[in-house]
Image (tube, grey):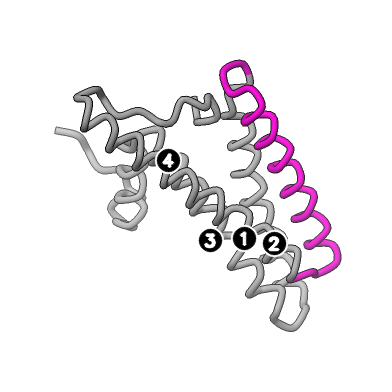
Amino acid sequence: MQQMSFSAKRNPYQAYRRTQIETATKEQLLLMLYDGAIHYIKRAKMKMQEPANEETLTEKTNLILKAQDIILELMAALDMDRGGEVSKSLFKLYEYMNWRLNTANIRRDVAGLEEVITLLSDLRQTWDEAIQRAQREANTTGASPEAPASGATTT
């Protein structure tokens, strides 16, 4: 019988999220990363729209840094050997997003955050559709469902 950690006892939501992550497929993890980055940027946008004080500026910066950490993970997960031009293009786009988040943070530029939210949302939707299509095709052929063969998925 597995013992529950002290933090899991105190916060069942954290235990639930940990289980979700530990049991997710690589495709589900990819979508979860996009969801997390979008979530943090939306929260940062709300903080940016509040009156500026030390607390809100710190919270906004920390939220943007969390989103940037996720984007760096997405960059690191690209399979540059198998992904070819798709992986190279995604890498450049992620670099742009990080730059845009940096400038938005420094300049308190809500439009910059909105731009990155849009880019991430579009990518997430595209990956979700590709994953669903691959699963439908796998069900039709009887093969095991895998992500699209672009090589740009997580490793």
**Residue at the left extreme, as displayed:** 1
Would you call the spot at circle 2 few (<14 residues within 10 Å), some (14-19), or many (20 or more)? some
Mark sitting earlier along the chain (1/3): 3
Direction from residue 80 to residue 33 in the image, left or right:
left
What element does badge 1 sit on? helix
Mark-to-mark CA distance, 1 and 3: 12 Å
Tell me whether the residue at label 2 lies in contact with that at label 1, contact meaning CB atoms closer than 8 angstroms: yes
- Identify residue type, mark 2: Glu
Please identify, in this view, whether the residue under mark 2 or under mark 4 is nearer the observer. Answer: 4
Question: Of the residues shown, which amino acid type is indicated by label 1?
Answer: Thr
Q: CA distance from mark 2 to mark 4?
A: 23 Å
Going from N to C along the chain, the mark reached first, 2 or 3, is: 3
Q: Which residue is mark 4?
A: 130
Instruction: Read off the magenta span.
Output: 81-110
User: What is the distance, in whole Å, between disc 4 and disc 1 at their CAs?
Assistant: 18 Å
Q: Nearer the viewer, mark 2 or mark 3?
A: 2
Q: Where's residue 117, x and y in %? A: 62, 60
- Tag shown at residue 118: 1
- Disc 3 residue type? His
Q: Mark 3 sits on what residue?
A: 39
Quarter of the picture containing the N terminus is top left
Name the spot of residue 52 as percent of width and height, x first: 77, 78
Question: Which residue occupies 62% across, 51% down?
Answer: 66
**Would you call the spot at circle 3 few (<14 residues within 10 Å), some (14-19), or many (20 or more)?**
some
Residue 115's disc number:
2
The residue nearer to you, when weighing 59 against 105, is 105
Q: Residues within 10 Å of mark 4 (few under 14, many from 20)?
A: some
Secondary structure under badge 2?
Answer: helix
Dot label at residue 66 = none
